[in-house]
Image (cartoon, helix red, strand yellow):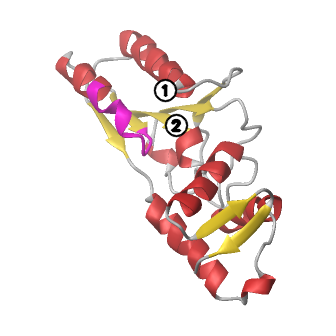
C-alpha cells in the first residue's frame, strides 16, 4: 500500500501520475497555483485526496510543508505503508534517507525531465517561422502553458521560461522575445 506526497509546484500536472496506484494522495499547491490539472486520465473508483494550498510565497515554502506532513503522516500511518514523494526536486534525498532509517519505506518518484519539456517547446518553435512565434513574454507564457498542458501553474510556466533563457534558446528584453533556434 502506498501514499503519494506530490510537489505539484515542481511537476506542474498530474497527467503522468497514475493516481489509482495510491491509497492516499496529498497534493501540495503553491500560493500561485489556483487549480490542479489532472490530465486526460479517467479513474473508475474514488481516490482519497488531500489538497494543501499554501498561502505564502517564500523560497522552499512548499518543501517545508511537504516535509511537515510527511512527518505527521509517518506518525499516524500503519508501518507497512510506503511513502512516495513525487517531485523532480533533489532536495528531498536527505529527508527520504532519514525516513527510511527510521523504518518506513520511502522513495522519490521523478516525472518526465525538464529536457523533455524543453524539446517539446523547441519543436513547437522551429516548426513555424520566427514571425509566427510568440513575440511577447505574456504570449510565450500562454504558449508554454498550452503546449505543456500546465495552464494555471504560474510557477511551472515561469520555470520553463527561465530554463529557455538559461539554455540560450531565447533571450528576453523587457516584454520582447528573441529566438536563438
Which residues fall within the magenta stretch?
A: 86-94
**Residue 96 can be seen in this image:** yes
Q: In the visual, does 27 lie left or right of 167?
A: right
> Secondary structure under badge 2?
strand
Residue bearing mark 1: 63
- Residue 114, image x, y percentages: 47, 59
- Residue at image position (52%, 46%) is 19
According to the picture, the residue beneath numbered tag 2 turns out to be: 7
Residue 1 seen in this snapshot: no
Instruction: Give yes or no for residue 11 being in the magenta stretch.
Output: no
Location of residue 177 (image quadrant)? bottom right
Is 83 displayed left or right of 132 in the figure?
left
Q: Residue at x 42, y 46 (%)?
A: 88
In the displayed structure, 132 sits above or below 16; it is below
Q: Looking at the image, which residue is at 64% across and 79% down?
A: 124
Up the image or down, 60 lies above or below 13; here it is above
Tell me where residue 96 appears, x and y as whole percent.
Answer: 29, 28
Q: Are marks 2 and 1 in contact (CB under 8 Å)?
A: yes
Q: Nearer the viewer, residue 122 or 48?
A: 122
Question: How far from the left and from the top, in percent, is residue 53?
Answer: 68, 26
Q: Residue at x 51, y 73 (%)?
A: 119
Residue 102 relative to residue 133: left or right: left
Mark nearer the viewer, 2 or 1: 1
Amino acid at each position: 500500500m502506498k501514499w503519494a506526497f506530490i510537489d505539484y509546484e515542481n511537476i506542474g500536472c498530474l497527467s503522468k501520475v497514475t493516481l489509482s496506484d495510491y491509497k492516499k494522495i496529498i497534493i501540495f499547491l503553491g500560493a500561485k497555483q489556483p487549480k490542479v490539472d489532472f490530465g486526460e486520465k479517467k479513474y473508475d473508483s474514488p481516490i482519497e485526496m488531500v489538497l494543501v494550498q499554501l498561502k505564502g510565497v517564500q523560497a522552499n515554502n512548499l518543501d517545508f510543508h511537504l516535509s511537515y506532513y510527511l512527518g505527521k503522516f509517518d506518525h499516524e500511518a500503519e508501518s507497512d505503508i510506503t511513502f512516495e514523494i513525487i517531485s523532480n526536486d533533489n532536495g528531498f534525498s536527505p529527508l527520504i534517507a532519514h525516513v527510511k532509517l527510521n523504518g518506513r519505506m520511502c522513495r522519490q518518484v521523478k516525472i518526465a525531465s525538464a529536457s523533455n519539456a524543453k524539446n517539446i517547446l523547441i519543436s513547437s518553435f522551429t516548426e513555424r517561422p520566427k514571425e509566427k512565434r510568440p513575440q511577447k513574454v505574456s504570449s510565450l507564457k500562454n504558449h508554454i502553458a498550452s503546449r505543456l498542458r500546465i495552464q494555471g501553474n504560474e510557477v511551472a510556466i515561469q520555470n520553463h521560461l527561465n530554463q529557455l533563457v538559461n539554455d540560450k534558446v531565447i533571450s528576453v528584453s523587457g516584454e520582447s522575445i528573441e529566438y536563438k533556434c
